[in-house]
Structures are given as C-alpha cells and as structure tokens.
Image (cartoon, grey):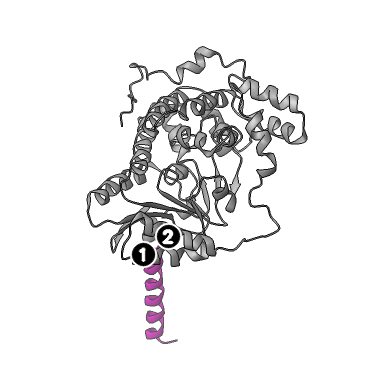
Amino acid sequence: MSSVVVVTRQLFRVQRIFHHLRMSSTAATQPEVLLEKQKNVGVITLNRPKALNALNLNMIRQIYPKLKEWEDNDDTTMIIIKGAGDKAFCAGGDIRAVTEAGKTGDRLAADFFREEYILNNAIGTCPIPYIAFIDGITMGGGVGLSVHGLYRVATERTLFAMPETAIGLFPDVGGGYFLPRLGGSLGMYLALTGYRLKGREVYKAGVATHYVESDKLPALEEELMSLKQSSSQKIDELLTKYHKETKREMPEVPEFSLEPHMDKINNLFSPDSVEEIFEALMEDGSEWAMQQLEKLKKMSPTSMKITHRQLSMGGHLSLQECLQIEYRMSQGCVRGHDFYEGVRAVLVDKDHSPKWNPSTLEGVTPRMLDSYFEPIPLSYLPAKELHL
C-alpha cells in the first residue's frame, strides 16, 4: 500500500472524527426552545424532545420576554406554540431540579414557580390569538403553557393529565382556575385522581378547543401563516374546518371514556371535603367507585386536601387570584415533606411506594391545611408574595 493511500485514509479518518465532534457539539448546544418570527406569526418550539420537552427555568426566561415583545409588536397576528418530536408537547416542569434545589435552600425552588406562573398569566392575558398544538404528552407545566391560551388543538396522540397528587404536589399552573370550569365535578375528579385523557377525549372534556389529526398539523400551521386576515374569527374558522374534516381514528372506541361515569363523578366528587368524597365512594360501593377509592388511597393525603380547597375556591376567582394562591401553595409544598417523598418514589427511585406524612386524611389538621393558603412567612427568605 502506497504512503499516499495511507495518508489519504488517515486524513479521511481525521475528517470523520472532526465531523462527529462537530455533530456532537451541535447536538449538545441545540437551543432548548426555538423562538422565531415567521411572516407575522410568532412561533415557539419547545426543543427538548429527548426530555419530552420538559419545561425548565431557562426556557421560561426565554419564552416570557419574547412573548411580551411579540405582543407589543403591531404586526404580530398570532402566536403558535408546539413541541419538537412526536412524543410530547410538554410532559411537565423540571420538578426534579426544583426538589433538589429545595433540599438545599437554593432559590430555584422559589424562582421556578414564580416565573412559571408569571408566564402562565401572560399566556392567559395575551391580547393576540395564542394557539397551542398539544400533540403528544401534555402534563403539568405543559398544561400551563397551553390551556390558558385562546386555542388548544389536540390530536390522536395527545395524553393529558394533572398527576400532581401522586407526587405530593397539586395541579398548579392555574389548575385552580381552569379545572373547576370544565363543568360539574370533572375537574375535581381529574385533579384528585390524575386520570389520563387521551386523543379526542381531551376535546370532549373541554381541555382542547379543537381536534385535528397529527399528520394534518403542518398543513394547518402553513394555512394559519398564510391567512390574509388573521382575526380571531378567521383563525377560528380555519381551525373549525380542520376539526370537522378530521376522521374518527378508531370508531369502535368511545369518544369519551368517562361518559358512562359522569353521573357518578358529578355526585361522588362534589362533597365539601376529601373525607366526604371517600365516604361517598364507600357508600356507592360499585366496582367503579371502589377502583377510584383505591386510586385515591395511593395519593398524598396532604396533596388531596389542599387540591380540594384550591379547586373549591378557584371556581369563583380570577386566573391572577388563583396563581397568587397557588404560589403560596407551591412554597408550602417546598417547605413540607410529601413533595420530596413523592418525587423520590415516582421519578427518582421509581419504587412507587411513597411514605406520606401525615399518612392519613385525618392527620392533615385544619391548621396544617390553612398554612398552605396563608401569606408566605417573612422568615422564608427565598420567596415572597406573587403579584400579577
């Protein structure tokens, strides 16, 4: 073999190595959120597909100022938010980072919730049409990025849930505002049990405003951007057109799995306390009621009781008032026990055997419950009241 061939092959190998290094470096430095102005449309793309587009503080701090900038720009006709990849819109907030910070007293545990709720409020008060493509997993923080906007487009891949009572938290990001407004006791049921809504159910429950097949989203986005008059009426007409053209993905599957149980949900989840809900389920005694009771027994007693009060209050409050209360609640959870234990059991060790404290509903005293809704103690330095 000639020396020229050897050198050529060595150079080729070096070039390949540098190519892989550049590719790795590019992948490692991919922005976590893409913020682009396309024509007159602001487009937000959550860009952490491997992490199911989970929301962290860095992303919040990029989205909020851009959202406000687009709002103030007269030529911005709408804002679209979507997730990269085909698995998730946004699977939630970076809760593990928050609990790690909370253990050490790092201010991230205060800043994350504060800035996330400020962003939720900005979405809820956005003066121009805000359209969320909730294609894939949409939970926790992902709900906060979508449900307060004017339009939410679900697909057959959408999986919606607020599973916070299973990790010692509560359905925050404005859950106290939108869940009681789903009608009847559906919001209370979803909040306490963490029940998962799938596909068309997300629309049927009132969480989404429209339902479109996932493979039609690119065409829908292109048409939205091409609207000559992008008023709310024109946007609604276009979304409705796509919604009506969408086929039933599986005709043999009911459009809303909870439909047969709605009477029981409205009756059994309407009592004035979690203890009374447990009693109502016991008295009903049906197979479905017993299944719900067993599910609830696995949840944090503290989380269930603060969630029940949160939703009972929230149906009569503004979004801003709900978020202010939820910020107090979030910091109560950071100061408590169950939030850390729930995250450990579900997300860290994954043994799904949390040791709640208190371990019973009766153990969560009225005084303990009140403490989650009272002004944040001045002695708790990382946090202060949320003002919107």
Question: Whole-percent x and y of residue 166?
Answer: 58, 33
Q: Quadrant of residue 292?
A: top right
Question: Which is nearer the N-term, disc 1 or disc 2?
Answer: 1
| Residue tagged 1 | 22
Rendered position, 46 above or below 221: above
Question: Label 1 to label 2, Cα distance in Å?
Answer: 45 Å
Q: What amino acid is labelled 1 in the image?
A: Arg
Which numbered disc, 1 or 2, marks the residue closer to the eye? Answer: 2
Name the residue nearer the viewer: 97 or 132. Answer: 132
User: How many neighbours does mark 2 have within 10 angstroms: few (below 14), some (14-19), or many (20 or more)?
Assistant: few
Question: Whole-percent x and y of residue 106?
Answer: 37, 29
| Chain part drawn in magenta | 1-23
- Residue 16 is covered by the magenta coloring: yes
In which quadrant is the C terminus drawn? top left
Q: Which mark is drawn over residue 237?
A: 2
Residue 199, visible in the rendered structure: no
* 204 left or right, relative to 373: right
Name the residue nearer the viewer: 36 or 378. Answer: 36
User: How many neighbours does mark 1 have within 10 angstroms: few (below 14), some (14-19), or many (20 or more)?
Assistant: few
Rendered position, 47 above or below 216: above
* 188 left or right, relative to 13: right
SS class, disc 2: helix
* 141 left or right, relative to 75: right
Question: Which residue: 42% across, 60% down?
Answer: 237
Question: Which residue: 35% across, 40% down?
Answer: 119
The furthest residue to the bottom: 2
